[in-house]
Amino acid sequence: MLKDFSQYIVYSLLAMEQGRLAGALEFFIYDTIKIFFLLSVIIFVVSIIRSYFPPERTKKILSHKKEFIGNILAALLGIVTPFCSCSAVPLFIGFVEAGVPLGVTFSFLISSPMVNEVAVVLLWGLFGWKIALIYLGTGLLVAIVAGMIIGKLKLEKWVEEYVYTIKTMGAAVDMAKQTFRDRLVYARENTTDILKKVWAYVIVAIGIGGFIHGYVPEDFLVRYAGPQNPFGVPIAVALGVPLYSNAAGVIPIVYALMEKGMSMGTVLAFMMAVTALSLPEMIILRKVLKVKLLAVFVSIMTVTIIGVGYLFNALL
Amino acid sequence: MEIKVFGPGCTNCHKMEELAKTAVKELGVEATVVKITDIGEIAMNGILSTPGLMVNGKIKHSGKPLPSLEKVKELIKAEA
């Protein structure tokens, strides 16, 4: 049906001749409608689930949880609990104060920006559901494993001391009880909010698939990080770490890289490095973590993500 | 009445402050609106995600998306 509709627009409404451009346009219209439909529906559904898990609730669920189970739960809750890096510090302090183990807190902090519905939907729409599932699964795995390692290393001493001295005043939380109607309103607002933020990136990504296809010049990254190069994964990750973008912003780049033949594992590793690790986030986290712990965090993440990249280059 | 807006300085935090001020003006209530930007103090007040809104020591809102002006008025009126 959607195919017929795109064909109708291109060949009847615009009266274009069959050809390369018309084909590209048809593909572009088809993909745009499909992906925006998927995005709207999934973000809406996730927002409803999300409304049941505000950070306050997540904190309560995770407090005094055992490691392992705690790490798994934290990684899963990271998908649905709303969180932006500007709140990383109060969230970190709140978690530690509530007795959430350090490693579990990290699992949450890692999973939250990296694994989310926008990333999964875009991967699904552009590369198929298998790649989307792989990203979801490995993203969770990275968050769980990296958090567990940090927990095992007992690095509590490398958290800034003042964090432990802050006692929250136990302010009464008096947020109105939400009816299901409120949740629907919240979900609608959240969906428009997110769509407003990501639509331009999504269009660019689809545009790359439809038009730039085959015209992107061979560039540095692909030549040196292609499938033949055994150092492709570490190079892609090293380039991705300082870059800062949300999942939607990195998708056009990811698409272009795929188009130019970069292997899937390398691309996934690059995407994880960009979304999970960034300079601005490190600067924010420096307020609560000593440089040593920050360095350990970045190293563990880098190594784990490189591992994921190699694994999928070998499997896919 | 004491209203506190919590936010380290992101756009949404500024918007929240504006919302609170407008709400106070439109409601015509006697209230001070204080903006808290220190991250330690934000955490100390039990706010986990910014922007946060506190009225008379009670957390009324935290996180995104922002509440509407009508909603903010309601939240403030409940404490007036």
Image (cartoon, coloured by chain):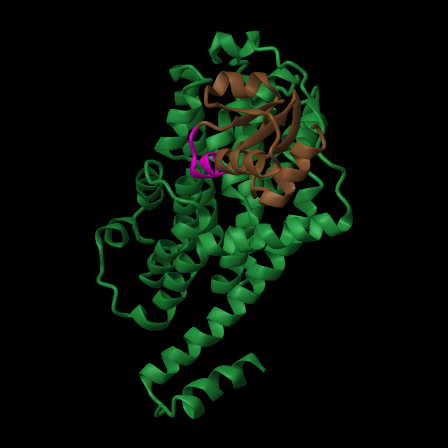
Asked whether B13 falls inside the magenta stretch, the response is yes
Q: Taking the image as drawn, is residue A72 in sight?
A: no
Q: Position of residue B52 (x, y in %)?
A: 57, 30
The N terminus of chain A: image quadrant: bottom right
Q: Nearer the viewer, residue A191 or A10?
A: A191
Instruction: Count the numbered circles shown.
Output: 0
Q: Nearer the viewer, residue B53 or A200?
A: B53
Position of residue A156 relative to residue A18, above or below, is: above
Position of residue B20 relative to residue A195, above or below, is: above
**Chain A is shown in which shade?**
green
Q: Which residues are magenta?
A: B9-15
Q: Taking the image as drawn, is residue A204 in sight?
A: yes
Asked whether A284 falls inside the magenta stretch, the response is no
The residue at the point 36 percent across, 90 percent down is A16
Relative side of A180 to B20, left or right:
right
Q: Position of residue A150 (x, y in %)?
A: 53, 22
**Chain B is shown in which shade?**
brown
The residue at the point 52 percent across, 49 percent down is A135
Q: Main secondary structure of the magenta part?
A: helix
The residue at the point 43 percent across, 76 percent down is A27
Specify the quadrant of the image occupied by residue A176: top right
Q: Position of residue A159 (x, y in %)?
A: 49, 13
Specify the quadrant of the image occupied by residue A246: top left
Relative side of B16 to A68, left or right:
left
Q: Position of residue A183 (x, y in %)?
A: 70, 48
